Image: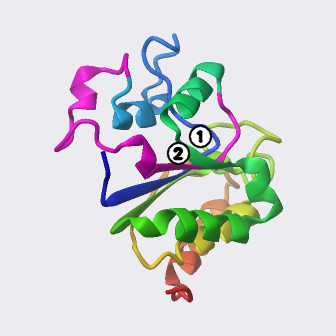
Amino acid sequence: MSSNVGLIYFDLDVDLHTPQTTTDGALDWMGVAHMLGVEGVARDLKELGPRSPLLPADAIFLFAHKNVEPCEQQLIDSLGIKGIHADAVASNPRGAGLQAALDWGQRFNHLLIHLDVDVIDFENFPIAENTRRKMGLTFEQVMTALEALLQAPNWSALTITEVNPDHGLADGSTIRDFASAVASALGRTPTLV
C-alpha cells in the first residue's frame, strides 16, 4: 500500500506496543501500532480513521528513537520501518533532520511531523511528562533537528505532545523558552526547495 502522506515520528520511543505486549495499559505507547493496524491492537482504535490501517509501514519514519523493546524491534524489522537512532541524531542533528525530511520525506505529497518532547533529556530541559534522565537529546539538538525537518517544502502539520509546564522552572521560563524555540523553528523560511 502506498500513501501520499508520510509521518516523521520524532520520539525517544517507537510506540509499537499492543495490549498484548505490555501490561501497563498506556495507550500512548501503542499509537504507531494502531496507525499500522498491527495484530493485537484494539479494533475500535485501529478503525478510527477513514481507512485501516491509517498509514502503511513505508509511510512512517522513526526519528531519534532509542527506547525500543524486543517486541517492537521485531515489528520494525518485519515491517521494514525506516528510521534513524537517537545517537545518530545527537551527532548531527541538522544533517539527520535534512536526511529524514529530504531523502525520505520527499516522496509524499504531505509530510507530517510528530514531536514528543520526551526525546529531550529531562535533566537538560525539564519539560516532558516522562522524567527520564540521561536518555534523550539536548534541547538544542532537538530544536536544531526540528528546524531541519521543517525545511521540507511538503510538510503539512506538526504535532507536539507530552509537554508538562509544571516540570519546568516555577517562573514559567522553561515553557516560554520552549515556545519561543518552536516559534523560531516554524518561522524560518524553507531554504531547500
Residue under label 2: 162
Compared with 119, 37 (above or below) is above
| Residue drawn at the location 42% of the way across and 35% of the way down | 31
The quarter of the picture where the N terminus appears is top left
Residue drawn at point x = 42 percent, y = 27 percent: 27
Q: Is residue 43 found inside the magenta-colored segment of the image?
A: yes
Q: How many marks?
A: 2
Instruction: Give the distance between the C-alpha atoms of the residues marked 2 and 1, in whole angstroms.
Output: 5 Å
According to the picture, the residue beneath numbered tag 1 turns out to be 129
**Type of residue at label 2?**
Glu
At which x and y percent is residue 167?
65, 46
Tell me where residue 60 appears, x and y as whole percent. Answer: 46, 48
Per the image, label 2 sits on a secondary structure element best described as loop
Classed neighbour count for the residue bearing mark 1: other residues with Cα under 10 Å, few (<14), some (14–19), many (≥20): some
Instruction: Please give the name of the residue rendered at 61% of the width and 28% of the height, measured from the top-left corner.
Output: 73
Mark 2 or mark 1, earlier in chain: 1
Q: Is residue 94 visible to us here?
A: yes
Would you call the spot at circle 2 few (<14 residues within 10 Å), some (14-19), or many (20 or more)?
A: some
Q: Nearer the viewer, residue 158 or 168?
A: 158
Q: Is residue 177 visible?
A: no
Q: Which residues are magenta?
A: 39-68
2 and 1 marks in contact (CB < 8 Å): yes
